Amino acid sequence: MTTSRRLAPAPIQQNRYLRARTGISIEEIARHDGVSKRTVEQSIQRVEAFRQGNSIEVVNEALSNSILKNKADMDRSINSALNAKRLVKDPEDGTYRSVPDHRVQLKAVDKLVEIAKTVQPKPGNVTKVNVGVGVGVRTTETNYLGFEERLRLIRAAMDAPAKIEAKTEVDDIAPPAEPTS
């Protein structure tokens, strides 16, 4: 059994932690579970401690330390793989000659890239919010109108009373002639 698995909080403790995070008071959780307020506080503390000790940053640091600790051995292994050769029999004279083993060399390059990705610093926690097509995006520097804004303008134009601008030109017309009898 691994250390992190042995120290993992029990499901009931995780449940108490989640309920506390959603705003339910410690007293209410204790009353619902039939335990003391101190037990609920300990459950929350245990989950928080576990989360801190098993964050992605801790895991990445452990991986980086392991790689750095074994760097000399890894360098030798990768150099050997990058210079891998294989024996090939010459069909004409039956002698063997050494040629580069490209399959092994390419695998070594793949592993080297994988290791480089692992030890490279990662950006901090970045929250990406996908707000859709222009929803909630307001800019003052451009004339960009998002979908919601265009729809709002179209609806306003449809709801507005129709205004027809027209000019009527009237010629001076002589009054109709009076009928003669």
Image: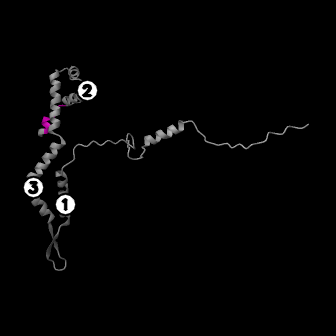
Mark before the other along the chain sequence, 2 or 3: 2
100 or 96: nearer the viewer? 100
Q: Which of the image's four quarters has the C terminus?
A: top right
Residue 64 seen: yes
Q: Residue furthest bottom?
A: 93
Q: Which residues are magenta?
A: 4-10
Question: Residue at 11% of width from left, 59% of height from top?
Answer: 75
Q: Are marks 2 and 1 in contact (CB under 8 Å)?
A: no
Q: Which labelled disc corresponds to residue 28?
A: none
Q: Position of residue 3 (x, y in %)?
A: 11, 39
Can you say whether 29 is above or below 93 in the image? above
Residue type (three-letter) at the residue carrying disc 1: Val
**Magenta highlight on residue 52:** no
Reading the image, the residue beneath label 3 is: 71
Can you say whether 17 is above or below 54 in the image? above
Reading the image, the residue beneath label 1 is: 109
Q: Are marks 2 and 3 in contact (CB under 8 Å)?
A: no
Q: Position of residue 50 (x, y in %)?
A: 15, 35
Can you say whether 38 is above or below 47 in the image? above
